[in-house]
Image: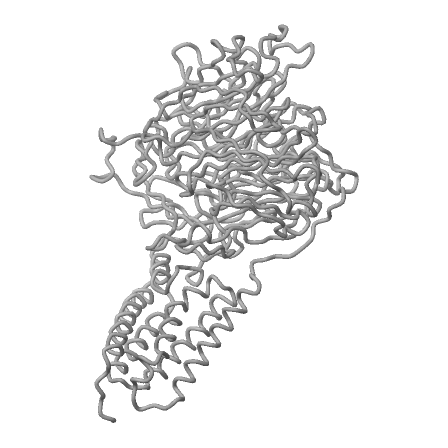
Amino acid sequence: MPTAKRPSLVVLMTAIVVVLIGLCLAAGGGWLIALGGSPYYICTGIALILTGILLFRARAAALWVYTVILLGTLLWAIWEAGVDFWPLVPRGDVLVLIGIWLLTPWVSRRLYGGSLAPRMALLGTLILSFAVLGASLARSPHDKDGTLAMTNAPAGGTEPLASQPKGDWQAYGGSGFGDRYAPLDQITPANVGRLKVAWTFRTGDMRGPNDPVETTMEVTPIKANHMVYLCSPHQIVFALDAGTGTLKWKFDPHVQDSPAFQHLTCRGVSYHETKPGAVTASGQPAPQDCPRRIFLGTNTGGLYALNADTGAPCESFGTHGRVDLNVNMPYAEPGFYEVTSPPVAAEKILIVGGSVIDNWSTKEPSGVIRGYDVYTGALVWAWDAGNPNHNEIPKEGQTYTPASPNSWSVSSADEKLGLVYVPLGEPDPDEWGGDRSAQQEQFDSSLVALEIATGKLRWMFQNVHHDLWDMDFPSQPSLVDVNTAQGMVPAVYIPAKTGNIFVLDRRDGKLIVPAPEKPVPQGAAPGDHLSPTQPFSELSFRPRAPLDGAMMWGTTPFDQLACRIEFHRLRYQGPFTPPSTQGTLVYPGNLGMFEWGGVAVDPVRQIIVANPMSVPFVSTLIPRGRKNPSIPPASMKPGQEEGTQPMFGTPFGVTLNAFMSPIGVPCMQPPWGFIAGLDLKTNKIVWQHPVGTTRDSSPLPVAMRIGMPMLGGPMVTAGGVAFLTSTADYFIRAFDVGSGRQLWEDRLPAGGQSTPMTYSEGGRQFVVTADGGHGSFGTKLGDYIIAYALPQGK
């Protein structure tokens, strides 16, 4: 064997780094093999150690060994991930950089016992690696191309609520149908690229020192009678001139900063206009003090009616314009019951749900749904899922059922059928349900159709049986008349966190698209139980294959290896793997593939635009003990969402976290978020594309399309353009509804975790977005309302 040469200082330092990297990969790789994972890391670690030893001896053979490492890594990466840019990057980024360094004169020319051959072999392998990476950039394998028909559907789809002026957006979802559609066509794929900011309004309402992390600006403004109405996180209502964005009035309910709040959110306000000859729910002539009303719910359980023209409280409603929603509410402590979504304002009845504190205790407020006289604020009916007599109104000294399923999201209404469609969550606490009553279980994570006039149950559909994953119905149902083999059918499309979209006849709740029951994993935590099956809709964005180790991600081989180790340590058997003390991987995660943003429906063309996303979560049950006491310590505030969720009254607490690498990137490989187009005539996904870039998540200001997590929903117009702002990068984007091709984007000053809306005023079509960020989502906070329009005179 040739005599060893003394390496230069540069080669020596390189050798030390390579050996240390090899030791890390070999040690972690050995742990991974013990857990049943890939042997790649231990093999590569050993080979790197050998490379380092050869570098210590200043031998050119180190380059041959490293060439084998790099070529093997490339072949392994393609075998595991295909020619897909983002999964390829962490498998080779560090190794490629080391390979480039080894070829520099400071290293390669200080090695002995070799010729040009090992350098050329390593250079060729590096060129091949870059060629594969370049090919992966040419096209994402996650793009699904297709074209939706942009002509009216056969037999003609219908636009809802013809009584609403064409240029208005009078409810959170555009109309009571929750379709997020506007019959406006001034903005088209041909001219959307010329959109400019028409006006900007700033609310001045920012997160205070005692506000929760979950302080968000999720509002979708509404437009009626030449005014735009919106609310800010502290539930301050603003009325703006629809043409200029000038403030006309504001109303402040004085919701103070409080650490007791788990959420500080106002998704919107509701609008009601008195018709000629209108009467109250009791048959009396409607009062005339507020011919046009704005309704607001607050974090403190207040329900306000305001004069839409002036902002003054409507004296005819409740007590000086306010109704106390805490009446007959059990455990009515500050922050335990919060109205975060706008109520449904039907002709005579105002339907109100609310959010209850998550995972604090079994002693929580009721999820009761209530119907109030839209004019007087008198309670007309109640529907309490936890009470066998659903419509019983408590007498003095009595309360509604504690911890019954609640509706924190937005409901929809079909006044022609006389029904309101209410999405429900699960009884609290979320992750252990051994003590839930049969009555609570009956309506757990369901959609219920209630009679608007009486609150009586017409039908129900359950999305998850015995929900232990917080997989409730988070989205507003979308109502649309669809063409089927049986003719035109009034349908409801209701997206779920699981990625399923359930399609039901809204008259009777019968499935239009099949959703067969399929077996799911078993093995509940002590004292709990599981449903043997769950419904799986045939219209769904849920992952078609379970996660495996090859899908784990990171920015380098090191955090990718850590994610693979953690994946194999967790309990995971596919969808609906039950919570456990071992730690359960929940995929799709608790955040859901769909959230409160819902989907956008073009009822005329029979098209849906959706923005599904998924980031896995980890759910770990914590038995009672010193770190998880049975009663809350004095220092523990109910509003906290960080750390262990106590779930007092059950045998366990729970920790809930996104499944992230040690440096804070998702452990599951991207893309995490898409925009997609569905054909309602076939109930098929026609096109789908990753949406969102690294611009605001990377240390470098580089906007590479990756498919980002998002919160919020899309909006669609008769002009054939869809708008979206909800991604974790700060952009508003416009898409061609027919193909999903991005047409235009503009930079936002803060996170746009909201749903845009559109209206016309003075002959111009405006697109409005609320950009205030989202505290727990980690986007930049702000207080912006921005309106876009085409330049005038062009």
In the rendered structure, the answer to whether residue 623 lies left or right of residue 220 reads left
In the picture as drawn, the residue positioned furthest to the right comes out as: 155
Q: Nearer the viewer, residue 325 or 619?
A: 325
Q: Nearer the viewer, residue 116 or 502?
A: 116
Q: Is residue 449 above or below residue 655?
A: above
Residue 375's quadrant in the figure? top right
Residue lying at 60% horizontally and 53% vertically, measured from the top left = 688
In the picture as drawn, the residue positioned furthest to the front comes out as: 793
Residue 293 visible in image? yes
Residue 549 position in % (x across, y down): 41, 61
Q: Quadrant of the N terminus?
A: bottom left
Q: Quadrant of the C terminus?
A: top right
Residue 748 position in % (x across, y down): 50, 42
Q: Is residue 155 above or below residue 299?
A: below
Residue 462 visible in image? no
In the rendered structure, the answer to whether residue 324 lies left or right of residue 486 reads left
Q: Nearer the viewer, residue 609 or 715?
A: 715
In the rendered structure, the answer to whether residue 690 lies left or right of residue 766 reads left
Residue 35 position in % (x across, y down): 33, 63
Residue 119's quadrant in the figure? bottom left
